[in-house]
Each structure stands twice: as structure tokens, then as C-alpha cells.
Image (cartoon, grey):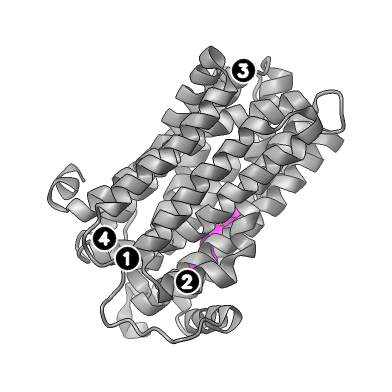
Amino acid sequence: MIELLRRNRDFKMLWLASVVSLGGDWFATVAIIGKVTDLGKGTWLTPALAASFVFVCQMLPSFLITPIAGPLADRFDRKRIMIVASLLQSGAALLFLVSDRNTLWLAFAAQAAVSTLAGFFSPASQASLANLVTPADLPKAASLLGTTWGAMLALGSSLGAWFSTQFGRDAAFIADAVSFLIAVFFITRIKGATRAPSATVRARMRPIVDTREALSYARTNRPLFFLLFSKGGFGLSSGVVGVLTSLADHRFGGGDRTIGLLLAARGVGVVLGPVVAGRLGAKKDVAGILRTCGWSCVVYGIAYFAVGHAGFLWLVIVLTAVAHLGGGTQWTLSTYGLNANTPDEYRGRIGSADFALVSLSMSISFLVGGWLDRAFGATTAFTVLAIVSLLWGALYLRATTSIRADAANPARA
């Protein structure tokens, strides 16, 4: 992977932009969760609900803007989309500075604004990838971007927890705003085309029609169809991440440091997941990706079921990392599969639809997880959502049996 960064300057610039932007986001996430948790104390807003609402504000806007973001990435200069989105994100991040107990809603609004703009950035970035690297390099590039998300989650959460403790949460919010400006610098240095030269651009954008057109194409390609819904199903159990804050606050003493450690463990798992899966023989053909996505959800469910019953912080940290070995593998391989199996003229819309489905399912799961924690406690919340993950993994493996068999044996297809 280092060799790929050395010889492909454009991909290196895209990767560096992702590093600083994601790093800044996770750097500030601990401060955001800590701030809304503190401001909500003494009200109906429990720590788990506060964290869940932050994560919902991170995810739900991407679902709502799908009909616009996807077609936009397939019709216009993807590089310019990324630049404009990052500049606006820098301004939105500064809104965290002015929220207080009387304007708590503003903190959630700021997070929603940053995430809405990320909903434009992400499909443009993902759709650009296959145009900036060769088909032979695409698996490495997709894997590197996937592990970068996890690495920045681990590093950014750890540093953010320390930084906000030492210098205050406002300093973390300013650092987040600056990170988007640094990302713009790297994006402007991309020289290659981020869209295929032959891509057809109609004069008028039709958000609903254009999105429906891409989904209709996906329905004609069964492997692509199931890859498209892979993350969405996985997201149904992701509300466990919001409940981690409840453990940090009630079972292990709370504070930005504990939240940072648990989020960092999540990031470590995301980084190591694709590596461990590769060592265990996970293949990157369609059959291998579908099989691994299903088993990843099973691992996720088993590990988080154990988290709900663990009584030691170090054990929760280890189990959280193990859970996201599965989560990181599922996310990275499904993203690669979509990039490798989608034509360029559909790639922005398919990528946006993929992000929208997981955003919607995760938002629902975060709300359900926060409610379960408030009504029945963290152990029940972890147990219910872990069972959801186990069931989805089993159903996904069952539903893709024939597709995997056909892909492994083309003579059957």
C-alpha cells in the first residue's frame, strides 16, 4: 500500500485529504458527545440518548440528500464537489463553539450540517476512486481508504479525548474546522480526471428519476443488489455504539477519556478487520465478499452480546475491537465490491444509495438503542441489538447462497 501511495500521486492526495478530514471529525466527536452529555444532565437527555442523537445527526442527513448527492456526483466535476463541501464544512464546524445549555439544539444542528455536506463529499470521493487508480490497484486503494477511516477513528478519538481534557472542547472544535481547510489543499492538488471522459451528462438533473434509474440497474445485477444492501443490514445493529456511552458514564466512571478509549477500540477493530480477514483467507471475488459480509455480522453480534455482560473496562475495550474486526471487514469489502462492479455512469448514485441505506438503518438503530438503554438498561440494549446482527448475518448468508455458488462456478450461471 505504501508503494501505491508513492507511485500514484492523485490517489495519495485523495487519501491525505481523507486522513486529515476524518481525523478532525473524530478528534471533535469525543468533545461533541462530552459537551451534549454535560449540557443534558438533569434533563430527560440521558448519556446514551445524547450520544445516540449525535450519531443520528452524523448519519441521517446522508439519507435525506441521496436523491441530490448521487446524481450530482455522476453529472458534475467530483473534485469541485469535494472542495466546495469541505469549505462549507469548515464553517459549519465553528457553530459548535456557540452552543450552550440554552441553545443545545445548535450543537445537533452543527453536526447535522457537517454531515449533510459529508453526504455530498462521500459519493464524489468514492466514485472518483476507480478513475484515479488502475483496476489492479483498486482492491488496495479501497482497503487503504477503509482502514484509514478506522485508523483516524482510533487515533482521532484518543488524541481528541486527551486534547479536549488538556485544552478544552472549543479547541477541538477549532481543530476540526481547520482540518477541512487542509483537506481542500490536498484535493486541489489532484490532477487526474475524477470522472470517465466518456461519461454522458444530461442538461438537466432529475434527482428522483436519476436515483431510480441507478437502483433499477442494481436490480438487474443480483450480486450488486446484495452488495448495495450489505451495509444497510449491518447498520440495523449499529446503535450499540451509542450505548457504549452509557457504559462509560454509569459502569466505568464516564468522562471524555473513557468515551475516547471505547471509540478508539472501535477504530482499532476497523483497521485490523480487513487484515485479519485476509489472513483467514477471505477472497475479494463476489462470492468471497458476500460470504465475508455475512460472517462479519455474526462476529459483530457475538462480540457486542458479550460487551453487554462484561464487568471490566479492559474486557469491554477488547470485545469492542473484536466486534469491529467484523464491522470494518464488512464495510471495506462491500465498498470495494460496489466500486469494482458498478459502471462509472452509475457509480456516484450507487455509492450515494449505499451510504443512504446504511445512514437510515444506523439512525434508526441509534434511536432504538438509546430508547432501550433508557427504558431497560445497557445490558438489554446490547443484547437486543446483538441478536439483530446475528439474525441479519444468518439471513444474508442464506439469501446469497445461490449467488455465491454461481459466482464460484460460472458454468452454473
Front position among marks 2 and 3: 2
Q: Distance of mark 3 from mark 4, alpha carbons?
A: 41 Å
Q: Residue at x 47, y 71 (%)?
A: 72
Q: Distance of mark 4 from mark 2, alpha carbons?
A: 23 Å
Mark 4: which amino acid? Answer: Leu
- Near mark 1 (Cα within 10 A), the count class, few <14, some 14-19 or many ≥20, is some
Can you give x and y, in whole percent of width and height, for residue 142 in the image? 33, 55
Q: In the drawing, does residue 180 fall left or right of residue 312? A: left
Q: Earlier in the sequence, mark 3 or mark 1?
A: 1
Q: Mark 2 sits on what residue?
A: 72
- Near mark 4 (Cα within 10 A), the count class, few <14, some 14-19 or many ≥20, is some
Q: Mark 3 sits on what residue?
A: 312
Can you give x and y, in whole percent of width and height, for residue 75 in the image? 42, 76
Mark 2: which amino acid? Answer: Leu
Q: Are marks 4 and 2 in contact (CB under 8 Å)?
A: no
Q: Are marks 4 and 1 in contact (CB under 8 Å)?
A: no
Q: Residue at x 64, y 18 (%)?
A: 255
Can you give x and y, in whole percent of width and height, for residue 111 in the image? 62, 43
Front position among marks 3 and 4: 4
Q: Check the image and report above or below for 102 versus 347.
A: above
- Residue 233 falls inside the magenta stretch: yes
Checking the image for residue 79, the label placed there is none
Taking depth in this image into account, of 349 and 410 the one nearest to the observer is 349
Checking the image for residue 138, the label placed there is 4
**Residue 180: quadrant of the picture:** top left
Q: Is residue 309 visible?
A: no
